[in-house]
Image (tube, grey):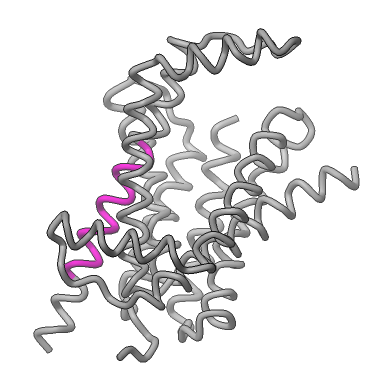
Amino acid sequence: MKSISELHLKTYIMIFFVVLFAPIGNVLLGKGMKVSVGEVNLHSATDVAQVALRALTSPFIWLGIGFLLLFFVSYLLVLSWADYSFVQPASASSFAVVALLGHFALKESISPAHWLGIIVICLGVLTVGNTHPRTTEHK
Amino acid sequence: MAWEAVLLLLIVVAGTSGELCVTRAMKTIGEVKDFRPAALFRVLVRAIQVPWMWLGIALMAIAFFSLLGALSVENVSFVVPVTALSYAAGALGGEFFLGERVSRRRWFGVLLVCVGVTLVFIGRK
């Protein structure tokens, strides 16, 4: 019984990291592309080199890559013990994180259909979360 | 029209099978129990020696560039909500490729997530 709740706890903690790090990484990459890189026109090899140089010297891009790496490592770790069919739908709560961050931090307007989608996703995540995180045998 | 369908198919199928392969790689490593940095580093070093990991990463890269391609084409980005199907594909793959038991309750949750993600994409317009 104790090991079951421990498994649940570490699964929830890892999924929390997954749904937090992925949107932060994406937002930073997006900001880096807008702030540091600007509009991309790839007409010649020089253009490609310039875009690459601007991207690789942008602190936002590097910070974004760092967060996406953290996301990927958390994802790998949780998948070492939990079902993919548990982790994948549960990670969809990142849509809620993105909407809430956009609404409260960036003051973006979120359409009613978007909010409805978030609510339906959360209901789905709660339903999946009510199943056991690991259904396969293990050594 | 045909290659647009190919792009969407690649996003869903390559993306999901990539993640399934990566999961398979991590399952051969076994449950991670030691979370100290040195131990985590050893897990990652072992993970990149599993062929499934590289197959998975390659498939995920294909899906990523297909998504970039689809987003840049006006009449394809309109159908990008179709990628919500990845969740159904993931549950199927979990059941048949990884041997997970996807109960009726879990299927229902996956279905809700699919519907919700589609609504989010539509609502963003």
Find the magenta span and give its range.
A9-23
Image: A38 above or below B25: above
Classified by dominant secondary structure, the portion drawn in magenta counts as helix
Identify the residue shown where x is 40% and y is 23%. A61
Q: Is residue A57 above or below residue B22?
A: above
Between A10 and A127, which is closer to the camera in this rendering? A10
Residue drawn at 57 percent across, 13 percent down: A51
Residue B31 relative to residue A88: left or right: left
At 42% from the left and 53% from the top, the residue drawn is A92
**B38 relative to A120 in the view: left or right:** left
Mark yes or no: residue A19 visible: yes
- Residue closer to the observer: A52 or A104: A52
Q: Residue A65's quadrant in the figure?
A: top left
Task: State left or right for residue B63 relative to residue A136.
Answer: right
Q: Quadrant of residue A67?
A: top left
Q: Note whether B6 is above or below A130 in the view shown.
A: above
Counting from the top left corner in percent of width and height, residue A90 is at: 38, 61
Is B117 covered by the magenta stretch? no
Percent x, y for residue B100? 46, 83
The residue positioned 43% from the left and 10% from the top of the image is A35
Q: Nearer the viewer, residue B65 or B84?
A: B65
Quarter of the image for the C terminus of chain B: give it: top right
Expressed as whole percent of the image width and height from the top left, the position of residue B119 reads: 55, 46
Q: Quadrant of the N terminus of chain B?
A: top right
A16 part of magenta stretch: yes
Residue A15 on image: x %, y %: 29, 58
- A107 vs B22, left or right, is left
